[in-house]
Image (cartoon, rainbow, N blue to C red):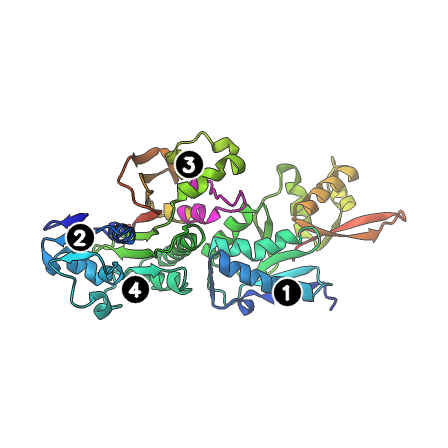
Amino acid sequence: MTFEVPSGCKIMVEAAIRFLSLANQLAATTRRVRMKFEEGDTGTMGYLNRMGFFDHLAPEVEVFPSRPGYSAAEAHRGGNAALVEIARISKDERDEDLPTRLTAALMRSCHTRADAAELEGAAWTIFAELIDNVFSHSSTLLDGYAALQVYPKGDRLSVAVSDSGLGIMQTLRPTIGNEFPRLTGLSDTQLLVEIFRQGLSRHGPDRGCGLKGSAAKAIKFQAVLDVRLPRQRVVLLPARGAYKVNTADCYDGLPLMWGTHIGFGFKLGG
Amino acid sequence: MNEDVRVLALREIMDRPEGWGRAQGREVYQRLLGSVEENTGTLVFKISMKDVKRVDISFASETVVEIARRYRGSKGFCLIDLTDPDLIENWDAAAARKGQPLLVWEGRTGRLIGAEPTQGCREAFQFALRHPTVRAAEFAESKSDMTIANASMKFKQLWEQGFLLRRESAANSGGVEFVYQRVG
């Protein structure tokens, strides 16, 4: 399988970690994977390198013109306030400081904002809950990834967490009949909205508050919530302080990509 | 040791100032449970949030909210030294999810988070919150249209749902009556 990244192609941070997860999934299933960067390391490849993309990319993936000779992420660590390296989420080496480190990186570029404290609290909770979800639910040997980026004008923030597990719908669907019988007739999109609105978990009605709470924090910043599932993508747009089915964009029948890939796109006014 | 109220510093049983995730929460829960079991005579545990920088909803759910639910009706747990709105929001979300009421005390003011009393019991709860201890008869006396039986029923419900504690006491009539107590 070959991925071609043409000249001028910009890859957002949430797309970058999805791309990384997908390439590693394909490599783990013994597919031959190639990435071709038309501009070489002066373009997107350089940007991805700075993020640490190639540090996490399975060594069997072939990169053209060639893998970067050194890790720009390592060379610049901490030097770029607006872009954070991709952080690995590994079950075997649980990094207890990860949400705090990611949030601290965010605050390097956002600490002067009037709503800095609220943003810091929201980002930390979202990272903590999403990363914990990867540990608790994803059932995979492959690593997950987290990343964030504040865009240059300072008016947008992307927070993304990606794992290569079974996918939230695959783990929840089989238990719906027992745990939430009233929801059995819902479509995947409707169910996904309810995961973030009511909080649903395969472990029963006591649980599921993490994703619900994350969404409640994000919605205060009018965040767009973008979820990629194995065959679908659902983009939830905030409407009057809530995520609703009728304001969701859905894409079905997409190429198979395992896992749950969640991105929050914050609007940072001012 | 027999002591009605005891302060437990959550930070002292956490590994770091930030608590997140279910796994960490379960570890801290075991330590919390150990502290509670060591103090069998204690009725109310004030859990101090001093030096706790952050907790996420999952951690909150597995620790204080879970222990409050476990001991509902027999021991009370409330939060003190907690003013950060973001943290309060997380404790509130975790407690609401498990249908557990929690009081957050700031000085002498108690703020209820998590589960809320039913509309019929709201006034009885507010009455109990204003007094260290209350009897059903006192609440009934304070209102013109309330019988003692009705007041008793409301307090009993509040006790069963974890809003109040209670203990038996000798009534003036010679029988037994319940004295209800707010948590903290």
Which amino acid does the dot numbered 2 rest on? Arg
Residue beneath the point at 37% across and 33% down: A245
Secondary element under disc 4, as helix, strand or loop, is helix
Q: Is residue A118 left or right of residue B33?
A: left
Q: Which residue is mark 3?
A: A191
Which amino acid does the dot numbered 3 rest on? Leu
Q: Residues within 10 Å of mark 2 (few under 14, many from 20)?
A: some
Between A109 and A258, the residue placed more toward the observer is A258
- Indicate which label's residue lies in the foreground, 1 or 4: 1
Cα gap from disc 2 to disc 3, whole angstroms: 36 Å
Query: Are discs 3 and 1 located on one and the same chain?
Result: no
Tell me which segment is drawn in magenta: A195-215
Pointer 2 or 3: first along the chain = 2
Cα gap from disc 3 to disc 1, whole angstroms: 40 Å
Residue beneath the point at 34% across and 50% down: A164
Cα gap from disc 4 to disc 2, whole angstroms: 35 Å
Q: Is B134 within the magenta?
A: no
